[in-house]
Image (cartoon, rainbow, N blue to C red):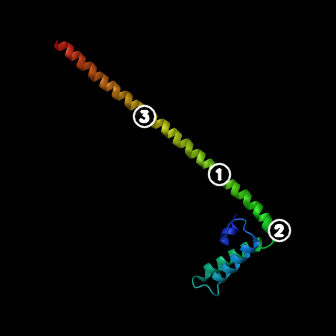
């Protein structure tokens, strides 16, 4: 779903007065006859601006669009929260694995150094 507020470069759920002011400013800027750049781009941009304004200028359409946008934004927020939860789970699992590996290394080091100390004690006792 296109965010018509973003098309008009205004905050979501802006008032009709802001919608109109932004529309007038943008349509002047991107009017194909006045745009000093790619005319195809200007035509596409003008069409987007007109489509957005066509919906947001009428109270009934704006209200319906705003309700649909709220639902879409909520879905996007939930999806982002799910992704964050998954990332946290991956981090936690990785941390557990790193902790396990560190523990194994420490055990090996202690085992190795313990063996060396034992050999030294045996050698020392054998020398006496």
The quarter of the rendered structure image containing the C terminus is top left
Name the residue carrying label 1.
79
Query: Gap in Å between the C-alphas at discs 1 and 2?
Result: 29 Å
**35 with respect to 112 (left or right):** right
Asked whether the residues under the numbered discs 1 and 3 touch, taking CB atoms below 8 Å apart as contact, a structural biologist would say no
Lower position in the chain sequence, tag 1 or tag 2: 2
Q: Is residue 6 above or below residue 37?
A: above
Residue at 71% over, 77% down? 21
Q: Is residue 97 above or below residue 27?
A: above
Q: Is residue 51 above or below residue 123?
A: below
Q: Foreground residue, 54 or 25?
A: 25
Name the residue carrying label 3.
101
Query: Gap in Å between the C-alphas at discs 1 and 3?
Result: 33 Å
Lower position in the chain sequence, tag 1 or tag 3: 1
Query: Gap in Å between the C-alphas at discs 3 and 2?
Result: 62 Å
Q: Position of residue 14 (x, y in %)?
A: 72, 68
Asked whether the residues under the numbered discs 3 and 2 touch, taking CB atoms below 8 Å apart as contact, a structural biologist would say no
Name the residue carrying label 2.
60
Q: Which mark is residue 15?
A: none
**53 with respect to 110 (left or right):** right
- Which element type, helix, strand or loop, lies under badge 2? helix
- Crowding at mark 3 (Cα within 10 Å: few <14, some 14-19, many 20+): few
């Amino acid at each position: 779903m296109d965010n018509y507020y973003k098309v008009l470069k205004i905050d979501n759920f802006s008032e009709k007065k802001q919608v109109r002011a932004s529309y007038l400013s943008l349509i002047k800027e991107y009017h194909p006859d006045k745009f000093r750049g790619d005319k195809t781009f200007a035509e596409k941009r003008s069409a987007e601006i007109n489509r957005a304004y066509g919906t947001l200028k009428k109270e009934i359409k704006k209200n319906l669009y705003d309700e649909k946008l709220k639902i879409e934004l909520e879905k996007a927020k939930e999806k982002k929260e799910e992704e964050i939860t998954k990332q946290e789970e991956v981090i936690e699992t990785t941390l557990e694995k790193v902790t396990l590996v560190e523990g194994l290394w420490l055990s090996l080091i202690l085992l190795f150094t313990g063996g060396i100390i034992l050999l030294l004690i045996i050698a020392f006792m054998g020398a006496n």
